[in-house]
Amino acid sequence: MSAVPAAPPPVSAEAGQGLLFVPPRARPAWRLIPARVVAMCVVELQKLRHDRTELYTRAIQPALWLVIFGETFNRLNVIPTGGIPYRDYLAPGIIAQSTMFIAIFYGIHIIWERDSGVLTKLLVTPTPRAALVTGKAFAAGVKAMVQALVVLVIAALLGVTLTWQPLRLVGMLAVVVLGSAFFSCLSMTIAGIARTRDRLLGIGQAITMPLFFASNALYPTASMPSWLQVISAINPLSYEVSALRGLLLGTPTNLPLDFAVLVVAAALGIAAASALLGRLAR
């Protein structure tokens, strides 16, 4: 006859209770940050899927810029564009502008989360603040990416000549995400300083158009006065527009420099917003 297997040693009640109080192992930051980014990007896509009203209404302004402003200055032929039709020259600038307008007011979401208690709950979790800010920054980038594709389709329907090479389109989306990540972090930084929706709206409206006009979105940098050229040289929007023109129109540009500036700007924005996130929650 086979031997009866021995029974497992009994576990004391104290030992069983001790297992219940063992905290879960903390995940390293290199795994936590991508997970947070993916989760918040999925949330933004779900919002767009359930309510597309904002997407439709935000498509009106870029269409007006391309139809009215672009066609008028295309006929006047007063802005040097290097032989490119002005409406084609304008299209990448309008893509950058429309995505910036989405990201620059993203701090309102943070203030709403503070008022509803969501932000406090997020801050007491083991997730680092940099991971929270990075997730929200790239979630804004995903929202802006959808907007950029909508403007791209509108431009194509209006007869704008743009490239449709897959690699260049992927590069365009990467540029839009990086630019939107910076501007959303700028908005969250301002939210940490202003701390109220009204103040954030006022500051956002005050800086949006100067950022737009102090870039090369509407006209070449060489056509600007010298003092405006200095501002344009430190404006991340100028590098975003240059990269978009190089990718979509094939105009000469320094793509490595454009990407490097956008990456550094996004990293600095994440650091600044992370430092002020706790102040906003108080």
Image: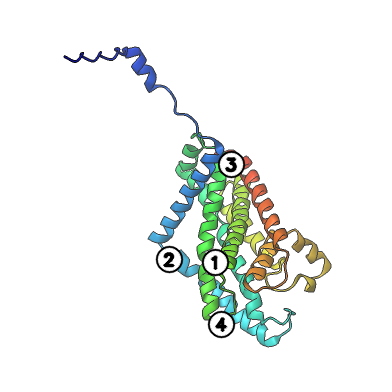
CA gap between label 2 and label 4 equals 25 Å
Query: What residue type is disc 1 on?
Result: Ala
Q: In which quarter of the image is the N terminus?
A: top left
Q: Mark 3 points at which residue?
A: 130
Which residue is painted at 55% across and 42% down in the image? 131
Q: Sort mark 2 into few (<14), some (14-19) or many (20+) by Cα contacts within 10 Å.
A: few
Determine whether, in the image, residue 152 is placed left or right of residue 8. Answer: right
Q: Mark 2 points at which residue?
A: 53
Q: Which mark is residue 148?
A: 1
Residue 55 to residue 85: above or below: above
Compare marks 2 and 1 and give the one earlier in the sequence. Answer: 2
Q: Which residue lies furthest to the front in this view?
A: 1
Coordinates of residue 81 in the picture (x, y in percent): 72, 78
CA gap between label 2 and label 3 equals 31 Å
Q: Can residue 148 be seen in this view?
A: yes
CA gap between label 4 and label 1 equals 17 Å
Q: Tag 2's secondary structure?
A: helix
Query: What residue type is disc 3 on?
Result: Ala
CA gap between label 2 and label 1 equals 16 Å
Q: Mark 4 points at which residue?
A: 159
Determine whether, in the image, residue 16 is placed left or right of residue 7. Answer: right
Q: Can residue 104 be seen in this view?
A: no
| Front-lying residue, 45 or 115 | 45
Q: Residue 166 carries which label?
A: none
